[in-house]
Amino acid sequence: MTLLIIIIVLALIFDYINGFHDAANAIATVVATKVLTPFQAVLWAAFFNFLAYWVFGFGVADTVAKTAHTMEINLVVILAGVIAAICWNLLTWWLGIPSSSSHTLIGGFAGAAVAHAIAVHGFSGYIGEDGTTHYWYEIVSWYKSSKDGGMPSGVIVIIAFIVLAPLVGLIASYLISIWLLNASRKSIYPKIFTVALMILTVWFVYVQMVPYSEIEKPRFDSHFWSVAFDPHNIKWFLVAFIILTVSVFCLIFSSLNLHQADGALKKMQLLSSAAFSLGHGGNDSQKVMGIIAAAVAVYINANPGVHMDAWLDVILPNEDLGVKGTMPGWIPLACYSAIAAGTLSGGWKIVKTMGSKITKVTSFEGVAAETAGALTLYFTEHLKIPVSTTHTITGSIIGVGLTKRVSAVRWGVTVSLIWAWILTIPISALLAGVVYFILSIFI
């Protein structure tokens, strides 16, 4: 039990470090454009990081918890993974490199699990409990197709989104920038497009809504408020609110003078920054929830018949067996509090990289980049994919830079960041493997 408590404490410390490491993701553009002072910006971001507690579910947490097969690992594996993730995060923060905290954690968890499998079984095959031959690399959940034909899961999917998340953010921010630029012109066609998009958005979000009859645990007696505040529905309401707000601005953009337009864009940047901070909190806090849930599952597997206190009564969902997961309320509350506290601490070296070194950012670019980043995070969270908020916002900033000209993006800095992204998972995995072997000597 002592080791389990240590893992939970270290996981929350990692969450705190994640907060100040990734604070730049949400505040870099509002600081660069001087919409908020640095202190105001971190307060703003931290508030919405914590507010995400009431918005998002636990889909990403479930994906992270199942990175490795919990029946085949021990608590030392998870401890090594968390320690390696903390070390890599602190190193990249010190160097001012906006690497992915998400991929650091996934890489550390997977690397320690592989090291454990090699230590126990070696490189040759072994007979598992099901009577079939298994190999050391099968301890990691590399790929699993969805039971209902939806989005598959596994480490390979997470690795794929190292490329896909910034690419989606880049394309989305580029398209939003083009949309805004055309809306500034006195032409009827951009307005027709905007109205059509508003109608399409309302229809799409309405289709995604979960009715009262399908809500498992209504939060209120009132049907209306239960539907309105269901976590699944809140997320789609936010998507609609973001798109409709930008649409309203686009309808009046051409009638504003330069000063009025800049003032409106700065106010909209507060909205886009808040939306991204919500996505950041919801996406990244769930990863730590997943690690804590995996640690509890491993402890129960290692101690069959043990009675867990209510505060640690965590059950991982199992689609194959029809088991629905449960998680005590203090775990998500602690995770969201830790990341919010970390964001309050800031991460000024990375703010400088994100806010000015990639491309020059104005309020116009800030709105486009943060809006694109927030929408990308909401959709990937819906698909239960733990993507990197760092990669997403970096891709979005590059996308707005491309609308000016290709040379507006400082590709030397960008290439260095991409190398950091590529190396994060393998280095974290190797570091976690080394930490695992060291810990195994003493534990």
Image (tube, grey):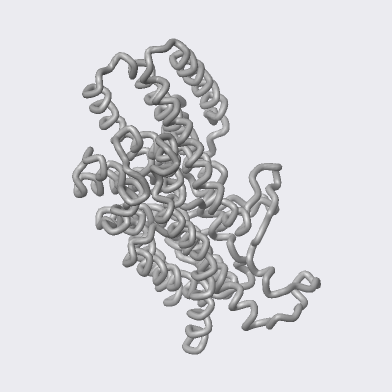
Residue appearing at x 54%, y 77% in the figure = 433
**Left or right relative to 37: residue 248:** right
Residue at figure coordinates x 53%, y 35% from the top left: 215
Q: Nearer the viewer, residue 2 or 135?
A: 135
Q: Please name the residue shown 79% across and 73% down the image.
A: 133
Inspect this view and state whether residue 289 appears.
no
Give the image quarter of residue 90: bottom left
Question: Which residue appears farthest toward the top when viewing the image?
Answer: 188
Res. 327 visible in picture:
yes
Residue that lies at the very extreme toward the front in this rendered image: 407
**From the viewer's perspective, is residue 346 above or below residue 294?**
above
- Residue 102 horizontal/vertical position (percent): 47, 58
Residue 333: x %, y % from top left? 37, 53
Q: Quadrant of the N terminus?
A: bottom left
Numbered circles on residues, count: 0
Q: Is residue 370 above or below residue 23?
A: above
User: In screen coordinates, is 18 left or right of 138?
Assistant: left
Can you tell which quarter of the image residue 219 is in? Answer: top left
In the image shown, does 276 or 394 lie closer to the viewer?
394
Q: Along the line of sight, which residue is nearer the eye, 346 or 43?
A: 346
Side of 386 where 246 appears, left or right: left
Q: Position of residue 208 (x, y in %)?
A: 55, 29
- Residue 438 pos. (x, y %): 49, 85
Residue 119 is left or right of residue 176, and the answer is: right
